[in-house]
Structure formats: structure tokens, C-alpha cells
Amino acid sequence: MSRSLPPQVKDKSRRTKVFDYAIPLRVDAQRASIRGTLFWQPDEGGGAPVGMFVGLGVLALVAIGAVAIVRRRRSHEPVEGAEAW
């Protein structure tokens, strides 16, 4: 996928047809094609995917909390082979 703007796009705020396409194929002995139209769609988000960053941050905090809980529990367990005084 190209990051540059297609030459067909004159107004960045409007959906624009770039080209029609046809992909030839054969099913058993029958010839067929998949046809479609490629459109350029304006970016409505307007920036970075904030939801993804928030989700990753929450996931990181949960993982850090889980590691801290496991370490705390393991530090209070008696060591095997150690004698109690």
C-alpha cells in the first residue's frame, strides 16, 4: 500500500474512485473473474490510534501488577530444606 496520495484524488475530504479491477481465475474448467473498484477513503481518525495505545497501557499495568503479586507471594513462602529455629 502506497503512502502517497493517488493522482485521481483532487479533494482529500471526499471518497474518490481510483480504478476498476478484474482478477481472472478458473474454477474447474470454467473461466471467471473477480471484479471490483478501488476507492481512496479519507482518514476520519485524524491521528494516532489512541484506543490502541490506551489498551496496551492497561495491559502493561495489569502484567506489572501480576508480576508484583507473584513475587510478593513467593517471597513469603518457606524455602525447601531450610530448618526453622
Image (cartoon, rainbow, N blue to C red):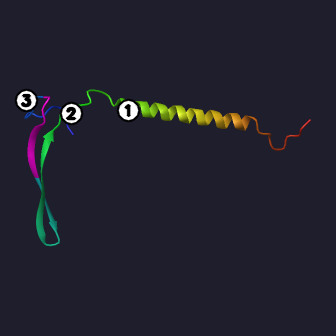
**Toward which corner of the image does residue 63 lie, by quadrant?**
top right
Left or right: 43 with respect to 18?
right
Q: Residues within 10 Å of mark 2 (few under 14, many from 20)?
A: few
Above or below, 7 relative to 26: above
Residue type at numbered disc 3: Lys
Above or below, 45 relative to 30: above
Residue bounds of the magenta highlight: 12-21
Residue type at numbered disc 1: Gly
x, y percent for residue 4: 17, 32
Above or below, 69 relative to 46: below
Tell me which residue sits at (15%, 32%) in the image: 5
**Toward which corner of the image does residue 25 lie, by quadrant?**
bottom left
CB within 8 Å, label 2 to label 3:
no
Residue at the spot of label 3: 10
Tell me which residue sits at (57%, 32%) in the image: 64
Overall secondary structure of the magenta section: strand
Residue at the spot of label 1: 51
x, y percent for residue 26: 15, 66
Disc marking residue 65: none
User: Quick check: is 14 in the magenta stretch?
Assistant: yes
x, y percent for residue 20: 8, 47
Which mark lies nearer to you, 2 or 1? Answer: 1
Q: How crowded is mark 3: few (under 14 residues within 10 Å), some or many (20 or more)?
A: few
CB within 8 Å, label 2 to label 1:
no
Disc 1 is placed on an element classified as: helix
Which mark lies nearer to you, 3 or 1? Answer: 1
Disc 2 is placed on an element classified as: loop
User: Quick check: is 66 in the magenta stretch?
Assistant: no
Left or right: 75 with respect to 67?
right
The C terminus - image quarter: top right
Disc marking residue 3: 2
